[in-house]
Image: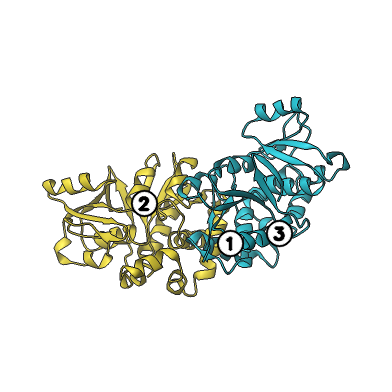
Chain colours: A yellow, B cyan
Amino acid sequence: MATIDVCLSPELLPLYHLEGKLVIVVDILRATSCMVTAIAHGVDHIIPFDNLEECAGMKAQGYLTAAERDGKQVEGFDFGNSPFTFMNPEVEGKKIAVTTTNGTACIKKSEGAKEIGIGSFLNLRAVAAYIRTTKSDVVIACSAWKGKPNAEDTLFAGVLIELLPEFEPESDNCLLALTLWKAAKENPVGFINETTHVKRLHKLGITDDIEFCMKQDVYPIMLLIKEGQIQKA
Amino acid sequence: MATIDVCLSPELLPLYHLEGKLVIVVDILRATSCMVTAIAHGVDHIIPFDNLEECAGMKAQGYLTAAERDGKQVEGFDFGNSPFTFMNPEVEGKKIAVTTTNGTACIKKSEGAKEIGIGSFLNLRAVAAYIRTTKSDVVIACSAWKGKPNAEDTLFAGVLIELLPEFEPESDNCLLALTLWKAAKENPVGFINETTHVKRLHKLGITDDIEFCMKQDVYPIMLLIKEGQIQKA
């Protein structure tokens, strides 16, 4: 029986044995939700970067650039971290270089896995279906907030575990995530509106993004990282 | 208003600013439960050690020694990690040197805090009362299992948060812990019997310990670490 596990923070990823496994990176607010939205709107591929300089440098190679730090768009970049900005015919066929506070760092720390996929509520059941097909051992890697576990990524891990009862939970983190999801599932937006991270975003005037990022199955696509590029599976 | 936060793994403690704060170290199964039991039965003080050699060396200074690795007592030590072994008139007035897989490491990583206390279900309300008196900002430091968050320590954090509504939650980890506790509180033993860590202990024949370690308020004492020694507050 294949196993499933949850890693609540990128800081804990070194404790997980990723070799031979499928890692699903999740940063609900908002990096992976944006990636799914962008590819669904015709972006050819996305390359994640740790730092602003390298990301900005990709302009010279014809890339659009997107950068977020502490919830805000960084000056000099084409995009920030709002999914709505990628719902734009101008992105069709384009390549995007992206860097965010938590999500891209989590992708970097997942290197060493057999395969890395991108998860969000927006493509939830496509992710679950892909996992079922591969039958690989899976680790859901939450991007967290500056290393500290957060509610929305943990909720996503919980619903994925609920959708995959045929996978054997590997640690108590699965129970943590599933219990949180069961407490939130009747009203996930209401639930996360009470969290510290979402209150932080609300202070920045970010509310529509949150509601959108919690919607399930808006885009039935699976994304994988192939040779460093995030693209449709 | 003083704040409360939860750190789900010692690996994440470097992300928390412990200066000026009260840290409550918790390792329900079983290090901190044993410490509370031992002091309640008259042990003068306990010194925690990272490694077996240093711990064993304390025999020369008249200490009894206790060592656990992977759930099992280590050969050559007076005690393992079962609370029942400390319910013994022979420990009265004695000093104990202890090392365990997770709990003592968590204590070491909490150095830098203003004050370090020892928490368990066995002294739950004494811990809550002490926190209320100090009015300090508090971090509940879960010892976890080899770095991965576990259910029983997270549950303890949850009940402590429930008992301290006057403290402001600092991160989503408080919500995670409180939600887990609310799901488990009707039957905490039944809840943790389903977890991976407890199943691991059951395989080693450890069942009475678990039921005992989940009992609330058996010993109404608060323990603090003073000059490296764990003793009654």
Q: Amino acid at mark 3?
A: Ala
Residue B166 position (above or below residue B16):
below
Q: Give the alpha-carbon distance from disc 1 to disc 2, as whole Å.
A: 45 Å
Q: Residue A116: x, y in percent?
A: 37, 47
Q: Which mark is residue B126?
A: 3
Mark 1 or 3, which is nearer the eye? 1
Amino acid tagged 2: Gly
Label 2 in the same subunit as label 3: no
Give residue B157's position: percent from left, percent from top: 60, 58
Q: Using the image, tell me which numbered label, if any, was put on residue A143.
A: none
Nearer to the camera, B161 or A66: B161
A66 relative to B112, above or below: below
- Measured as percent of width and height from the top left, residue A121 is found at 39, 64
Q: Is residue B214 rendered to the left or right of residue A188?
A: right
Which residue appears at 70% of the width and 51% of the height?
B233
From this viewpoint, is residue A113 visible? yes
| Chain under callout 1 | B
Give the residue at mark 1. Answer: B135
**Whether residue B182 can be seen here:** no
Q: Quadrant of residue B217?
A: bottom right
Number of marks drawn: 3
Distance of label 1 from label 3 (alpha carbons): 14 Å
**B153 sits left or right of B5 in the view:** right
Crowding at dot 3, Cα within 10 Å, few <14 / some 14-19 / many 20+, comes out as: some
SS assignment at label 1: loop
What chain does mark 2 sit on? Answer: A
